[in-house]
Image: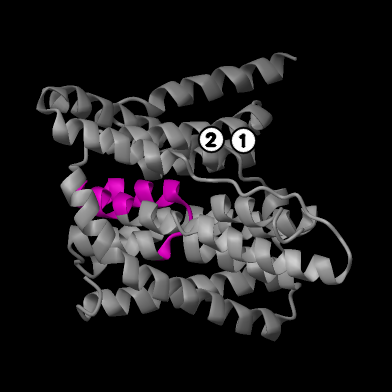
Amino acid sequence: MKNQSVKKFLFIILSILCLSPWASSAIALFAGILFSLFIGNPFQDWTTKAVKKLLALAVVGLGAGMDLNVVTKVGMQSIGFTALSILAVFAVGSVLGKLFKTPLNTTLLISSGTAICGGSAIAAVAPVIKAKNHEVTVSLAVVFTLNAIALFVFPWIGHLLNIDQTSFGLWSALAIHDTSSVVGAALSYGPKALEVGTIVKLVRALWIIPLALIFSFTTAVQLKKQNAVTTTKTKKPWFILGFITAAALVTFIPELKSTGMMVYAGAKKLMVLTLFYIGSSITLEHIKEAGIKPMLQGVLLWCFTAVTTLTLIMSNIIS
């Protein structure tokens, strides 16, 4: 009991420190991972549930620091290559799935997480395609692990190649799985990278809806052939609407600008705290559950996405 109390005390202290001016997104994530692996998260169930809500709140709060005109412009510019990149990821994911002989559902889940927005896409697609629990767990473990790596590797590569903030934000949004890791990586790179990365990633996240509907339709057709019935509902990323609403308020009501910037600053610190909680949820069991083949499939698919998008951005084909 005493040992558990010490764990809780240390966890709470670190959570508070994440809200301080000295904590960065990378430090918070790394601290969370170390805490989980060497001490153990005493609030595992709570943090796992809290992450989704905190992430949504942080994303909405970030909208308060954005100009809706910029959001619209960047969003419209990114629709075309976002759609093409999603199709390319699913095509390559399908080939890798056949190469490694991974189950179809696992391939679809890993591809969905890589193509759109990590865990959120997996959570939306899994019930639609009737994925089994172990298939969902494996897919989440793969995406979760790569998300943690991306938060450290992407800024390092960005500085190494001297990538400008706009290009880095675009690259992060197209090549990193979860919104939290995109924001975390862009946050450490600079304000412009954060703006572009957040907007493009949210536009990308909107594809959850049509993707889930497509899978729902194809699954329904298959079940109909098997004389089965489905009542699955599609989860919708409502936090995107909140982001746009917050941006609209500060754009069209100038008096809210100063308040919006305070909310924006608070949202950035909340994102750092969320990343600490995400890191603290990673366990050795998660990594082991992923297995070699699905992990290799996820890594190769991720590398394909990262290298291809970076090459296109550096060549000014995507801008």
Amino acid identity at mark 2: Val
Q: Name the residue under label 1.
A: 48
What residue appears at the point 40 percent right and 29 percent down from the top-left corner?
A: 18
Q: Which mark is residue 82?
A: none
Residue contact between numbered discs 2 and 1, judged by CB atoms under 8 Å:
yes
Q: Mark 2 points at which residue?
A: 51
Does residue 170 appear left or right of residue 90 in this picture? left
Estimate the x, y position of residue 73 in percent, counting from the top left.
Answer: 20, 57
Label 2 – label 1 distance at C-alpha: 6 Å
Q: Can residue 158 be seen in this view?
A: no
Name, please, the residue furthest toward the right. 227
What residue appears at the point 36 percent right and 25 percent down from the top-left corner?
A: 19
Viewer-closest of 298 and 124: 124
Q: In this view, does 253 lie above or below 100?
A: above
Main SS category, magenta section: helix
Q: Is residue 259 above or below residue 170?
A: above
Q: Residues within 10 Å of mark 2 (few under 14, many from 20)?
A: many
What residue appears at the point 47 percent right and 25 percent down from the top-left corner?
A: 15
Mark 1 residue element: helix
Q: Is residue 256 above or below residue 291?
A: above
Estimate the x, y position of residue 222 in percent, counting from the top left.
Answer: 78, 70
Number of callouts in the render? Answer: 2
85 drawn magenta: no
Q: Give the range drawn in magenta.
A: 175-199
Viewer-closest of 318 and 164: 318
Q: How crowded is mark 1: few (under 14 residues within 10 Å), some or many (20 or more)?
A: some
Estimate the x, y position of residue 253 in percent, counting from the top left.
Answer: 14, 28
Estimate the x, y position of residue 137 in percent, counting from the top left.
Answer: 71, 53
Amino acid identity at mark 1: Thr
Mark 2 residue element: helix
